[in-house]
C-alpha cells in the first residue's frame, strides 16, 4: 500500500506544494549524491581497468582481441555499473534513510507533523525517496561515462587514433533497442532502491522484537526486485 502511494505521490500537485518538502529534497539530493560521487567514480575507474586488462589479455590469448573492447562495454557499462550503483546507493543512502523514517514514525514525529497540518509522507518520506532515485541515476550515468573513457585509454592509450573504431563499436553496442533497455533498467533500479526501503520505513508498525526481521525482509525484497530487473534486461538484450 505504502509503495503504491509513494509512487503516485510525486505525480500529484499535493506532493510538490509543500515548501518544506522542496527544501528537504534539495538537501537530501545533495547529501545522498555529492559525498559518494567521487569515491564511486574512482571505484568504477579501477573496476574498468581491472576488467579491461583481464578481458583484453584473455581475448588476445584466444585470438579474438577484436571483440575484447566490445565485451568490456557490454559487461561493464550495460550490466555491472547500473547494478553496482543501485546497490551502492541502497546500502549508503536509502536503507539508512528508511531506518530514519521508521525511527521518526516510532518516536511520534509523524503524529506531530499531522497535528501541525503537514503530511509526513510529503515532508519527510518523499524527499528521501526522490533523492535516492536521483542518486542512482546520477551515479550510474557518470560512472558509465568514466568507464567508457577509462576503457578507451586502457586499450588505445593517450591517442586519438582509435577513436573512429571505438565510436563505431560503441554505436554498435548501444543500438536503439539496447539503449532503451539500458535507460529503462536504470530508471527501474532507481525506483526499486528508492521506494522499497522508504515504504518499509513508513509502514514500520511491527513490535520491537519483529523490526529486525521486517527490515531484513524488506532488504531481501529489494535485492530480489533488482535481480529480476537485471534478468529481464539480459533477456531483452541477448534473446
Image (spheres, grey):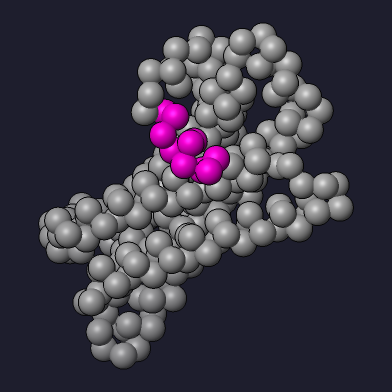
* 81 left or right of 177 in image: right
Q: Viewer-proximal residue, 80 or 233?
A: 233
Q: Viewer-proximal residue, 90 or 201?
A: 201
Image location (x, y in percent) of residue 234:
33, 70
Magenta: predominant secondary structure element?
helix
Q: Give the image quarter of residue 110.
A: top right
Q: Give the image quarter of residue 220.
A: bottom right
Magenta stretch?
1-10
Image location (x, y in percent) of residue 153:
34, 57
The magenta stretch spans residue 84? no
Q: Residue at x 51, y 9 (%)?
A: 19
Res. 50 in view: yes
The magenta stretch spans residue 4? yes
Res. 161 in view: no
Examine the rendered structure and indicate whether residue 180 appears above or below residue 126.
Answer: below
Q: Residue at x 41, y 34 (%)?
A: 8
Q: Residue at x 35, y 59 (%)?
A: 77
Check the picture and name the quadrant holding the C terminus: bottom left
Furthest toward the bottom, the residue is 62
Furthest toward the right, the residue is 209
Image location (x, y in percent) of residue 27:
57, 21
Q: Residue at x 54, y 23 (%)?
A: 122
* 183 left or right of 86 in image: left
* 164 left or right of 25 in image: left
Q: Viewer-proximal residue, 104 or 157?
A: 104
Image location (x, y in percent) of residue 38:
53, 40
* 209 left or right of 152 in image: right
Amino acid at each position: 500500500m505504502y509503495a503504491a502511494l509513494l509512487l503516485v505521490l510525486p505525480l500529484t500537485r499535493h506532493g510538490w506544494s509543500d515548501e518544506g518538502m522542496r527544501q528537504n529534497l534539495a538537501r537530501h539530493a545533495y547529501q545522498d549524491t555529492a559525498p559518494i560521487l567521487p569515491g564511486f567514480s574512482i571505484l568504477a575507474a579501477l573496476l574498468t581497468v581491472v576488467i579491461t586488462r583481464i578481458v583484453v589479455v584473455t581475448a588476445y590469448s584466444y585470438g579474438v582481441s577484436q571483440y575484447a573492447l566490445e565485451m568490456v562495454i557490454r559487461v561493464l557499462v550495460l550490466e555491472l555499473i547500473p547494478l553496482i550503483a543501485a546497490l551502492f546507493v541502497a546500502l549508503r543512502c536509502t536503507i539508512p534513510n528508511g531506518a530514519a523514517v521508521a525511527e521518526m514514525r516510532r518516536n511520534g514525529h509523524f503524529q506531530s507533523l499531522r497535528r501541525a497540518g503537514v503530511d509526513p509522507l510529503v515532508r519527510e518520506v518523499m524527499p528521501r525517496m526522490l533523492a535516492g532515485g536521483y542518486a542512482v541515476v546520477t551515479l550510474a550515468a557518470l560512472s558509465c561515462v568514466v568507464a567508457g573513457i577509462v576503457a578507451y585509454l586502457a586499450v588505445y592509450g593517450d591517442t586519438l587514433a582509435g577513436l573512429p573504431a571505438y565510436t563505431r563499436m560503441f554505436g554498435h553496442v548501444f543500438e536503439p533497442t539496447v539503449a532503451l533497455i539500458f535507460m529503462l533498467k536504470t530508471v527501474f533500479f532507481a525506483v526499486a532502491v528508492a521506494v522499497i526501503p522508504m515504504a518499509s520505513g513508513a509502514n514500520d508498525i511491527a513490535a520491537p522484537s519483529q523490526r529486525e526481521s521486517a527490515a531484513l525482509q524488506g532488504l531481501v525484497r529489494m535485492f530480489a526486485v533488482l535481480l529480476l530487473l537485471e534478468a529481464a534486461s539480459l533477456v531483452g538484450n541477448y534473446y
